[in-house]
Structure formats: C-alpha cells, structure tokens
Image (tube, rainbow, N blue to C red):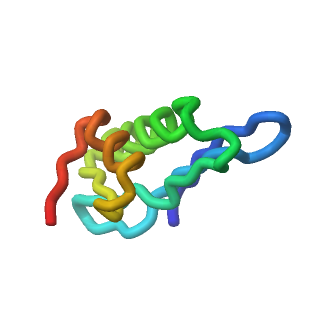
Amino acid sequence: MENYFGIFKDNKLVAVTGESFQTNNFIEISAVITHSNYTGKGFAKQLVTHTANSIFDKNKTYFLHVDVTNLGPVELYKNLGFIIIR
C-alpha cells in the first residue's frame, strides 16, 4: 500500500480510499469504504476522485474491483466514468 486518503467528521474517520496492487503502468484503487452513518454525503466520490487524480499524476492508469451486485458503488463508479470490464 502506498497511500491512503480519508475524511474525518466529528473527530472520527468516516470514509477511506487507498492504493494497493501496483505494476509499471497501473495502480489499483482499493479500500473504498464509508461508515454507514455517513453514506450519501459524497465522501466516497470525493475520495475516489482524489485517489484517481493522485494515480494519474504518477502517469499511471487506475482501476478498481467491485462486486457487480453492489449497486450503490457500481453506480458511483459509472458516474465517475469507470467502465465495467469482466
């Protein structure tokens, strides 16, 4: 793991993203999670965007894995421009 990014509210870490698996050309966005009391506030969107930009600034391509039945995150990632590849 190279970088983690988080959002704190009320002195609590409520949302996180990170970077994990890495090759010469790619870095995986991972650990995308928001505490259930704080969902729907755009925190995951902010963090995924920030993490993707951080990877892009390293001249690498970002990707992530998601269960296609996990509809909330799938919709978020589609809205951010990700495409599903199987």
Q: Is 41 left, or right, of 20 in this rendering?
A: right
What residue is rendered at 84% in x and 39% in y?
11
Q: Using the image, determine if residue 47 lies above or below residue 3.
A: above
Q: Using the image, determine if residue 39 lies above or below residue 36.
A: above
What residue is rendered at 66% in x and 49% in y?
35
Question: Dividing the image into 4 quarters, which one contains the C terminus?
Answer: bottom left
What residue is rendered at 18% in x and 54% in y?
84
Quadrant position of residue 41: top right
Instruction: Locate residue 32, reporting x and y percent.
Output: 50, 54
Instruction: Locate residue 31, reporting x and y percent.
Output: 51, 60
Q: Is 29 left, or right, of 18 in this rendering?
A: left
Q: Using the image, determine if residue 66 lies above or below residue 74.
A: below
Q: Farthest residue in the right direction? A: 11
* Frontmost residue, 65 versus 67: 67
Instruction: Locate residue 6, reporting x and y percent.
Output: 63, 44
What residue is rendered at 38% in x and 37% in y?
53
For residue 23, say whether it is visible.
yes
Q: Farthest residue in the left direction? A: 86
Total marks placed: 0
* Frontmost residue, 64 versus 69: 69
For residue 65, say whether it is visible.
no
Q: Using the image, determine if residue 63 lies above or below residue 53.
A: below
Instruction: Locate residue 57, reporting x and y percent.
Output: 35, 39
